[in-house]
Image (cartoon, rainbow, N blue to C red):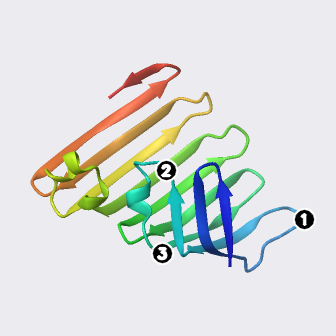
Amino acid sequence: FVSIVAGGTRLDDLAAQIHSDGFDIQNRAGPVTVKLQAGGLNTDVATLAPLITGKIDVDLAGSVSKDAIAIDQGTLRSDALNASLTATVALADLSMQLKMNADAVATAFPPQIASVLGARVKFSATAARDPQGSFAANSIEFTSGTLSAAGTASMQGTDIQA
């Protein structure tokens, strides 16, 4: 186990495993699984710290090719958060497709927000980045207790719409 420090963030007791059945090193292509476990994460990013308390597990399964990186199944778990995602990134232009779902304990949010939430907060969205760098989040859904919200958001240059 090792610890890694970057800026104001420290991962403790980190274990990493990268595995592939059939990866073609010469062509840099094939299936890949990545497993990361950390005994804890300390960060000075106040909005992130409560979501990543306790032991952290990351599992990714996907593939790498000369053209793209694909995550067919990804999960992130901590004491406060369960999240899953799928994603594809084109290496030539960094265009991206992302789908994510997250379920977090409401106590991981600031007290002034947590006080109006139910016990858990559920969030899902799909997102895309085009070759020109424009970003769009579609099918955004948020639910907690009796609260719910849905919508879209996009950014092109300095223009943000929601």
Numbered label attached to residue 98:
2
Question: Picture coordinates of residue 144 (x, y %)?
Answer: 18, 56
**Marks 3 and 1, how far apart in space?**
36 Å
Q: Bin the neighbour count of mark 2 within 10 Å (Cα to Cα): few under 14, some 14-19, many 20 and up.
A: some
Question: Picture coordinates of residue 158 (x, y %)?
Answer: 49, 19
Q: In this view, does 16 lie above or below 141?
A: below
Question: Picture coordinates of residue 14 (x, y %)?
Answer: 63, 73
Confirm or deny contact between disc 3 and disc 1 (CB under 8 A): no
Q: Bin the neighbour count of mark 3 within 10 Å (Cα to Cα): few under 14, some 14-19, many 20 and up.
A: some
Decide which of tag 3 and tag 2 comes sooner along the chain.
3
Confirm or deny contact between disc 2 and disc 1 (CB under 8 A): no
Numbered label attached to residue 47:
none
When asked about the image quadrant of residue 138, the answer is: top left
Q: Residue lying farthest left?
A: 146
Amino acid at pointer 1: Gln
Left or right of 24? Residue 120 is left
Q: Which residue is label 1 attached to? A: 26
Residue depicted at x 62% and y 33%: 131
Left or right of 46? Residue 67 is right
Amino acid at pointer 3: Lys
Residue depicted at x 23% and y 42%: 150
Q: Bin the neighbour count of mark 1 within 10 Å (Cα to Cα): few under 14, some 14-19, many 20 and up.
A: few
Decide which of tag 2 and tag 1 comes sooner along the chain.
1
Residue depicted at x 52% and y 64%: 41
Q: Dot 1 lies on which element?
A: loop
Numbered label attached to residue 55:
3
**Marks 2 and 1, how far apart in space?**
28 Å
Q: Nearer the viewer, residue 149 or 25?
A: 149
Amino acid at pointer 2: Leu
